[in-house]
Amino acid sequence: MKTYPVYLGACDTYDSAAIHSVLKTALDHVTPARPPYGKVVIKPNLVMAHPRVATDGFTRPEVVEGVIRLVRETGNDVERIDISEASGLGITTGGGYRWAGYRRLKKLGVRMRAMEEHPQKVVTLEKGRLHKHLTLTAAMADRDFLIFVPKLKTNVLAHAYTGALKLNIGTVDSRERMLFHDYRLPQKIVDILEAANPDLIVTDGIRFSYGGNQMTQGGVDFGLIAVSTNAVAHDMVCARLIGLDPFKIEHIKEAMDRGYGPTSFSEIEVAGDYPRERAAAIVKDLDFGFYPVDRFPSNFRIVSGTPYCTGGCQGILLDWLHMIRDRKPKLLKRFPRLTVLVGKVTENIEDRIVVLIGDCARASTTVSCRRKIVIAGCPPTHKRIVWDMMVNLLLLAPLVRPSLIIDGFVAYPLKKIKGWLVNSGKRT
Ligand code: SF4
């Protein structure tokens, strides 16, 4: 029977030398099919980083630095190392690199690739159930060796767990990112795996980010570096370590069912010096914030219809509510009393103001109100919800800050134009 090794190393500090040392020990237990070679791509989680409002939900540069040093030391004929990412929320990946402190990594001879502004390539999928082709950075499409460096964190859009498998949402361009980002998110995540299946995975679990919005939530010292060569085995072990059942996390289950890794823990060999009882003691009383959106306590009366899209409207609304609670909890008390519909609702709804979130909610025909606010999309993006809640209800999410507004509404469109010029006529 094939077994999948996963190494759990203890590391309490964001010191790249200490991290590098843990990684070297890990490679005594976890051996990639071949050493890093040729064009190496490192994919971190930089969905969002910002020194004031998004401080704990991204892969720290010290971990990536440890990985780069490992590649330089153990690699074979390494031609180049690229870091490739597509940040979320319609902000620039370049801003993410800057705010997360990645720019200093350039001195190690790596290139920073940003999906929206650098060369792209279209790859065809043979096993995709939803996607038949995907647009990746050219660096990602042409790579010889891929290293995922996810953050250990919770995410209410993905059954409370985001790790190696979910990381590949950030490998595709922004338009494709939102396609099927609804109840089909698990299939989508596994489709992308065909184009971006890592050869090595290193999780930054030195701090564990949990409990709120995937970008703005806080964290707790956890002291872990996890290493493996299979994304399914990796996520099964890390999910269980934080007290979740991987068999109830739909994208992990989907990847198991589609043959991307082990289907039981008996196929996984866990090694390393990380004390499991430490993880159990840390997560014992933590609330991961993953529950039905209509149970979120606020002045809003939230009515959830069908479908229930954990990865779509309901999940994104829950994520927005968490974002307020994470960084501006007093604002929750100032929410106006109104009704929010999410998903298609068939019961009679009467209120002075009704907010309809998503195209299914728009299709609800039983609404009687004086003012109707529609936030369209399937699903609407985070950026759209943040903007429309601000414009219509004067609810300023914590992300409404000058630096992020300039980045999202000035720099991002300019980077997109640059990307369009760079790629025009070049995509294959
Ligand atoms: S509009 Fe929203 S609720 Fe309807 S399918 Fe799309 S994501 Fe799901």
Image (cartoon, helix red, strand yellow):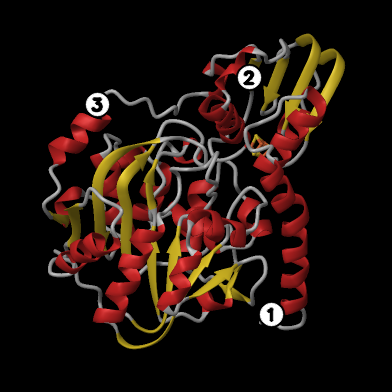
Vertical arrangement, residue 255 with respect to residue 53, above or below: below
Percent coordinates x, y for residue 399 in the rendering: 64, 38
Would you say the residues marked 2 and 1 are in contact, meaning their CB atoms lie under 8 Å apart? no
Q: Amino acid at mark 3?
A: Lys
Residue at point 74% right, 64% down? 416
Per the model, the C-alpha gap separating discs 2 and 1 is 45 Å
Residue 126 in the figure: left or right of residue 152: right
Do the CB atoms of the residues marked 2 and 3 lie less than 8 Å apart?
no
How many neighbours does mark 3 have within 10 angstroms: few (below 14), some (14-19), or many (20 or more)?
few
Which residue, given by chain and number where applicable, does mark 3 sit on?
A: 284
Q: Which residue is mark 2?
A: 331
Circle 1 residues within 10 Å: few <14, some 14–19, many ≥20: few
Q: What's the distance in space between the residues labelled 2 and 3, CA to CA?
A: 29 Å
Q: Viewer-proximal residue, 407 or 82?
A: 407
**Which element carries disc 1, helix, strand or loop?**
loop
In this view, the mark in front (3 or 1): 3
Residue 35 vertical placement versus 3 (above, below): below
Amino acid marked by disc 2: Leu
Q: Which residue is mark 1?
A: 427
Q: Residue at x 47, y 43 (%)?
A: 55
Q: Is residue 209 above or below residue 29?
A: above
Q: Is residue 298 visible?
A: yes
Does label 2 or label 1 sit earlier along the sequence? 2
Q: Amino acid at mark 1?
A: Arg
> Which residue appears at 60% of the width and 47% of the height?
181
Q: Are marks 3 and 1 in contact (CB under 8 Å)?
A: no
Q: Residue shown at 46%/67% (left/top)?
A: 104
Secondary structure beneath dot 3 equals loop
**Label 3, label 1: how far apart the Cα atoms are:** 49 Å
> In front: mark 2 or mark 3?
2
- Residue 226: x, y in percent? 25, 55
